[in-house]
Image (spheres, grey):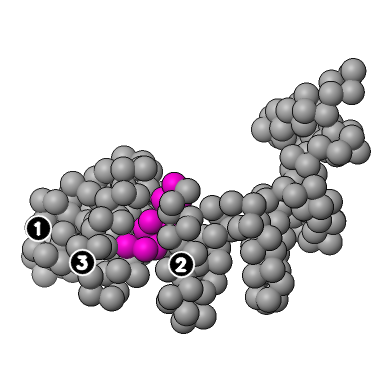
């Protein structure tokens, strides 16, 4: 790094950031950015964004975007979306999509879906899926399910699940549950839970509660609640309330 290698400076900045030393991270990253390294510019944008300085974040992302960095374009699109400027978001994501960036394609698919344009959503998501984006596959599965095509839904979701996408596993679990196959539902949710997915843990708690295994239900709800799942926290409160009520009745 002392010899002016911007990639080494960027790596040192990333290491400093991971160690919690943001000042040192910023020093290294600014040196690398001044030498034209777009990855350093993006990391500086992230630092500024985490500090709440959106103007500085945007400036760094714009510098990286001028160097045709798709991640920067994605970030600029997200900033625009958060600011309510969907047209600007679309412009940035289309630029990134033109660079074959699957995240941008996914974002455009979600944007189209939110606008009710399911055909456009499907087109963008299919492009992202072809590039291996598991989130796009999951969304395509959900679109197919909503359209009543459960076979297509299952195909897309299984592709995403094979890429360790917990959202796909949860959706496959829901499909199995709705078909009355509780064993398959449990198996899919257990796979997602093993990946640390709080929604799956909550779902496993619900399955256990429905089966009358309140100890297992509480254990799953507690795991999900620790990860911030509000539904699991509510379910725990209801279990505790029911338990108190039963003790009161017994007394």
Point out residue 145 in the picture as x, y percentages from the top left corner: 27, 69
The local crowd at label 3, few if under 14, some if 14 to 19, many if 20 or more residues have their Cα within 10 Å, is some
| Secondary-structure class at tag 2 | helix
- Whether pointer 3 and pointer 2 mark residues with C-beta atoms closer than 8 Å, the reply is no
Q: Is residue 235 left or right of residue 21?
A: left
Using the numbered discs, state the Cα–Cα distance from disc 1 to disc 2 in whole angstroms: 32 Å
The local crowd at label 2, few if under 14, some if 14 to 19, many if 20 or more residues have their Cα within 10 Å, is some
Residue drawn at (10%, 51%), measured in percent from left and top? 183
Tell which of 83 and 104 is nearer to you: 104
**Residue that label 2 marks:** 123
Using the numbered discs, state the Cα–Cα distance from disc 3 to disc 2 in whole angstroms: 19 Å
Q: Is residue 14 above or below residue 101?
A: above
Residue drawn at (48%, 55%), measured in percent from left and top? 128
Q: Main secondary structure of the magenta part?
A: helix
Q: Which of pointers 1 and 2 lies earlier in the amino acid sequence?
A: 2
- Magenta-span inclusion, residue 137: yes
Tell which of 214 and 11 is nearer to you: 11
Q: Nearer the viewer, mark 3 or mark 2?
A: 2
The local crowd at label 1, few if under 14, some if 14 to 19, many if 20 or more residues have their Cα within 10 Å, is few
User: Which residue range is magenta in the image?
Assistant: 132-141
Point out residue 120 in the picture as x, y percentages from the top left corner: 48, 73
Q: Is residue 166 above or below residue 151?
A: above
Tell which of 70 and 8 is nearer to you: 70
Q: Can you tell which quarter of the image residue 139 is in? A: bottom left
Q: Is residue 69 above or below residue 206?
A: above
**Residue that label 1 marks:** 181
Point out residue 14 in the picture as x, y percentages from the top left corner: 71, 32
Q: Is residue 26 left or right of residue 212?
A: right
**Residue that label 3 marks:** 150
Q: How many marks?
A: 3
């Amino acid at each position: 790094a002392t010899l002016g290698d911007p990639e080494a400076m960027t790596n040192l900045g990333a290491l400093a950031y991971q160690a919690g030393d943001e000042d040192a991270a910023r020093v290294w990253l600014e040196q690398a950015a001044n030498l034209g390294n777009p990855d350093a510019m993006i990391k500086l944008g992230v630092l500024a964004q985490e500090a709440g300085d959106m103007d500085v974040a945007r400036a760094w992302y714009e510098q990286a975007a001028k160097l045709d960095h798709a991640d920067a374009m994605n970030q600029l699109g997200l900033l625009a979306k958060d600011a309510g400027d969907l047209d600007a978001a679309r412009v940035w994501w289309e630029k990134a999509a033109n660079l074959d960036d699957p995240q941008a394609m996914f974002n455009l698919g979600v944007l189209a879906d939110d606008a009710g344009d399911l055909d456009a959503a499907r087109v963008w998501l299919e492009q992202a899926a072809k590039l291996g984006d598991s989130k796009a596959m999951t969304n395509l599965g959900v679109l197919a399910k909503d359209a009543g095509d459960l076979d297509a839904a299952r195909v897309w979701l299984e592709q995403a699940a094979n890429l360790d996408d917990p959202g796909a596993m949860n959706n496959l679990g829901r499909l199995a549950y709705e078909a009355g196959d509780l064993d398959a539902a449990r198996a899919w949710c257990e796979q997602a839970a093993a990946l640390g997915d709080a929604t799956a843990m909550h779902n496993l708690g619900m399955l256990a509660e429905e089966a009358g295994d309140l100890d297992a239900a509480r254990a799953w709800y507690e795991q999900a609640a620790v990860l911030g799942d509000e539904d699991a926290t509510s379910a725990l409160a209801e279990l505790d309330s029911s338990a108190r009520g039963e003790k009161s009745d017994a007394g």
